[in-house]
Amino acid sequence: MDAAFTEEQDEIRRTLRTLLRERCGPDEVKAAVHAAPGYDEALWRRLARTLGLPGLALPPAYGGVGCGVTELALACEETGRVLLPSPLLATAVFAAPLVAAVGTEAQRAELLPRIAEGALTAALAVPGRALPEALGLVGARDSAWAGGGRAGGVQARPDGDGGAGWRLYGQVEQVLGGHSAELLLVAARAGGYTRGRTLLFLVPAGADGVTAGADGLVRTRLTALDATRPQARIELRNVSAELLGVDDGGSGDGVAEALAAVGAAAAAVLAAEAVGAADAALARTVDYVRAREQFGRPIGSFQAVKHRLADVYVAVQAARSAAYYAAWAAAQGGAEGAGAALGGAE
């Protein structure tokens, strides 16, 4: 492992930090989270145009920058520093890699360039509240989270018109960015109980950020504890959908493997984002103890305060090293890389 960052990686960090410092003060963040989509659409387009942020980890053949999980983690450390509300996690970390890994060449050619240029946002919808299980972050890596072909979850059946289409039934809670995403990737069970398998489906969700899209699709924005992470309830009532990739009639192991790979990258990216937020909090605390006076001197001059801040500094640096290692491990791929990424992100 080479722990030194390249000039390109340092430039990504510097450029993004400068831009976000200009556009993401506390007032701007508050205004963004109260907007209909839950983020600043103009800033999102600028990030896409200036840095290619949505396509940072996508191949150049599809309009991406051609970087990887490490660069995406560095970018998310900076977005975490300012608590940026954006569709970056839902679109670039969850949805885009699944389209790249599972989709057909025609689907990749249609969707990935639009994602890379910031013209298309997407969200991953997993039944119930089972996103951590689906991504292989907790529990056994099986498809029990998808409903197992029994009642509950989201069920898929071939469209009755004899074509290649599908119909989806069910409800999904707590879909990150689901109320405004223009494309939904829905995990659903097909084949009933005896031949059940988990597949991914594409559902167009419209461009108005509210409810327009496929017939039978209802989206409701939910109140979330973290306002910068808007969530939605997705109801699917006989919704027409397109299968992502090809159904070979197998067990759906390819989908499970793709979801696990996304989980390893997501864990690393979220760890880096948390490091950025912690580092910013520490910097603000240091500024405060330098300015706040007690007994005629700055409180930062007291030994007890210095010791506490030193402990926090060491903890932040250790967390940063672990997050960087997790990103590096996720970029290596494979079961060992995924395991190391999850361990580092913890």
Image: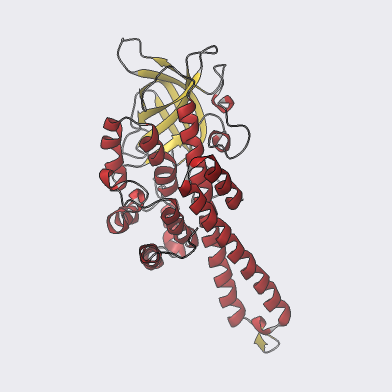
Query: Which picture quadrant has residue 290?
Result: bottom right
Closer to the camera, 282 or 275? 275
Q: So how many labels did they put on this image?
A: 0
Give the answer, above or below, for where 240 lies relative to 140: above
Where does the image place residue 139, in percent across and percent down from the top left?
A: 63, 34
From this viewpoint, which residue is outermost toward the bottom? 296
Asked if residue 173 lies left or right of residue 91, the reply is right
Closer to the camera, 183 or 162? 162
Could you tell me if residue 175 is visible in this image?
no
From this viewpoint, which residue is outermost toward the front? 1
Residue at 35% x, 63% y: name it.
8
Closer to the camera, 35 or 240? 240
Could you tell me if residue 344 is visible in this image?
yes
Residue at 32% x, 29% y: name it.
104
Residue at 56% x, 77% y: name it.
287
Asked if residue 72 lies left or right of residue 309, the reply is left
Where does the image place residue 175, in percent across and percent down from the top left?
A: 48, 37
